[in-house]
Image (tube, helix red, strand yellow):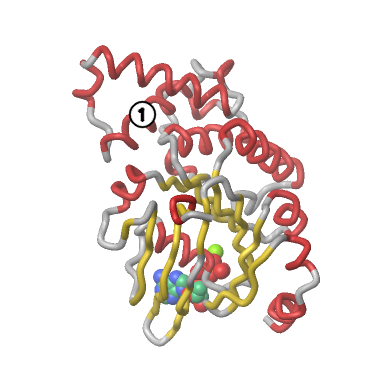
Amino acid sequence: AASDDVLLETRGLTKEFGGLVATDDVNIRVERGEQVSLIGPNGAGKSTLINLITRRLEPTDGDIQFKNSSIVGLDPHEVVQRGVSKSFQTASIFPDLSVRENAEIAGLAAENGAFDFKLLTHRDSLTDVHQRARDTLEAVGLLDSADETAADLPYGDKRRLEIGIALAAEPDLLLMDEPTAGMSPEETNATVELIEEVKQALDLTFVLVEHDMEIVFNISDRIIVLNRGRVIAEGAPEDIRGNPDVQEAYLGG
Ligand code: ADP
Ligand code: MG
């Protein structure tokens, strides 16, 4: 593939916490249009890797290229503006506002780094914002609930709104860290269905951290396996399933 197709690339990405190496010389690539799952036992460094990409953590060493330019040194909101969104953070919902307002604010915030009320005085951009919020709510199946207060949504719809908020930024890359953590089997199924829907509707590129192997094997076209901060295997689901190194990592702890 041409380098234009490479959306995300980490080079020698290393994060140390005191003496502990949480990610150790990690080199991964994600191409546009790919659905990648990041797996590995507890403490493997998955969340650290995600938080390095969103710039919530500063790397000890190495680089992160997004659309062929380094994002190390950028603020988290600048990374969002470049096209990286992280989903399923309940904190991103404004509970007292309507579903529609949540989607509108998310779109505005992504464009401008922070929500700015002055923007609402520009008629053109306002039309734009309304349309984008509509599209987003349609993509996550919440158009009929647009006027409801976010706090009143049933649990499953709140998850839909969370992913809608991430998508309102029109990200090139969506990051998801254990979106089904703490969910009942029904909620888990609904969330997986939602990710499938959105993936098809938007041709989304994503990196998903998920511990449920059935979900991982079904939803991703490539899997990256981390253990003790290092990439120990990488490939299509059918190659990872029987990989002895991967099995040992999970059994060995
Ligand atoms: P995973 O998400 O794969 O379970 P993490 O990335 O959360 O793993 O953690 C990787 C390692 O880094 C673990 O040993 C964890 O205890 C350690 N770690 C993560 N965050 C911090 C932190 N803020 N301070 C110190 N150690 C951390
Ligand atoms: Mg984690």
Q: Residue at left 71%, top 75%? A: 246
Q: Horizontal placement of 130 versus 238: left or right?
A: left
- For ligand 2, the image quadrant comes to bottom right
Can you identify the residue that label 1 sits on? 105
Q: Residue at left 58%, top 37%? A: 203
Q: Horizontal placement of 88 versus 53: left or right?
A: right
Q: Quadrant of the C terminus?
A: bottom right
Task: Report the front residue among 227 and 238.
Answer: 238
Q: Residue at left 41%, top 33%? A: 94
> What's the amino acid at mark 1?
Ile
Q: Quadrant of the N terminus?
A: bottom right
Q: Horizontal placement of 242 versus 223: left or right?
A: right
Residue 181 in picture, x, y percent from top left = 63, 54
Q: Horizontal placement of 253 versus 101: left or right?
A: right
Q: Residue furthest right?
A: 242
Examine the image and state in which quarter residue 105 appears: top left
Task: Report the front residue among 183 and 114.
Answer: 114
Q: Is residue 132 above or below residue 239?
A: above
Q: Residue furthest front?
A: 2
Task: Report the front residue among 13 and 107.
Answer: 13
